[in-house]
Image (cartoon, rainbow, N blue to C red):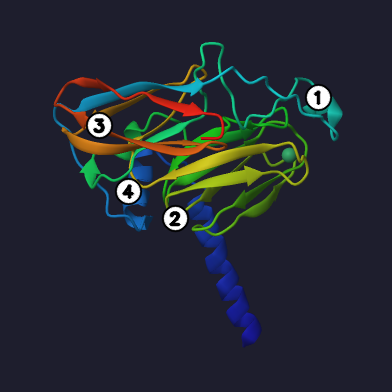
Amino acid sequence: MNRAFSLIALAFALVACGGGEKADTGKKATTDTAMMSSGSYEAMEVMDGGTITGVVTFDGAVPALKKLEITKDVNVCGKTAHYDESLVVSQTNGMANVVVKITSIAEGKGFETMSASSEVDQKGCAFIPHISLVPAGAKLTILNSDGVLHNIHTYSEINKSVNVAQPGFKKKMTQTFAEAEMIRVACDVHNWMGGYIAVADHPYYAVTDANGNFEIGGVPAGTYTLEYWQESLGTKTAEVTVAAGASVEANAMFAAGS
Ligand SMILES: [Cu+2]
């Protein structure tokens, strides 16, 4: 009797897994998000939305990038040089990898318009991009382009921690995170690997490019608090007023130790 029950349970589990492997369109991801996220964000058509643009800069001398020592799988991981990415500043003082978001917004554009792919690759034994952006409750695609063992190990406070091995033959897997949070991700096989997953409860998020630039479009007219998050220097906020169909600049500056 017990055994029969186990077999039935197993059959259900297999069916559930099979369903999960389907390729999702962006639209489906939005639906998933609406169903699974505990947030109250509602997607709607934004007529005549405004755009927030800006540049995040570092106040001070451009810090030198620290080279990291590659101690394992050197034939794969050592093909390119690796640098500490905890504070990456361009020659024009632009800060890369700053997550910029509207702190609170109840309704607006759909998640399919979010200007980043919900995908992270382990390539050359680094997380690329350094910060990936994924809607809460939607699938983050995790690739292993290296053909060596990696493991995704997340350090989170709100979401459940993930610690999953991804052997070289397993090129692709997915994970979902239910709640909005900045989650640090590491690999226990290669201790220099580090990145972040930004789990978003609305689509008004952006990650600055190599020169510190960002753009958030389709914003309903109104006054918002913008938050700038940098992994070493913390957060800053600014108030920004967006007019219908217009562009507004919202720059930020971080100083060392600020
Ligand atoms: Cu690894």
Q: Is residue 105 above or below residue 7?
A: above
Viewer-nearest residue: 226 or 120: 226
- Contact between labelled residues 3 and 4, with CB atoms less than 8 Å apart: no
Q: How far from the left and from the top, in percent, is residue 145?
A: 68, 31
Density class for disc 3 (Cα within 10 Å; few <14, some 14-19, many ≥20) is some
Q: Residues within 10 Å of mark 4 (few under 14, many from 20)?
A: some
Of badges 4 and 2, the one in the foreground is 2
- Which mark is nearer the camera, 4 or 1? 1
Q: Where is residue 180 drawn, in percent x and y?
A: 42, 50
Q: How far is the residue under mark 2 from the one under mark 1?
A: 35 Å
Q: Earlier in the sequence, mark 4 or mark 3?
A: 4
Q: Is residue 109 visible?
A: no
Disc 4/disc 3 C-alpha distance (Å)? 29 Å
Instruction: Check the image and name the residue furthest to the top.
Output: 92
In this rendering, which labeled residue sits more in front, label 1 or label 3?
A: 3
**In the rendered image, which residue does mark 3 sit on?**
240
Give the residue at mark 1: 78
> In this figure, which residue is indicated by the disc labeled 4?
31
Label 1: how many residues lie within 10 Å, few (<14), some (14-19) or many (20+)?
A: some
Front one among 252 and 131? 252
Q: Which residue is mark 2?
A: 178
Residue at screen point 48% across, 46% down: 139
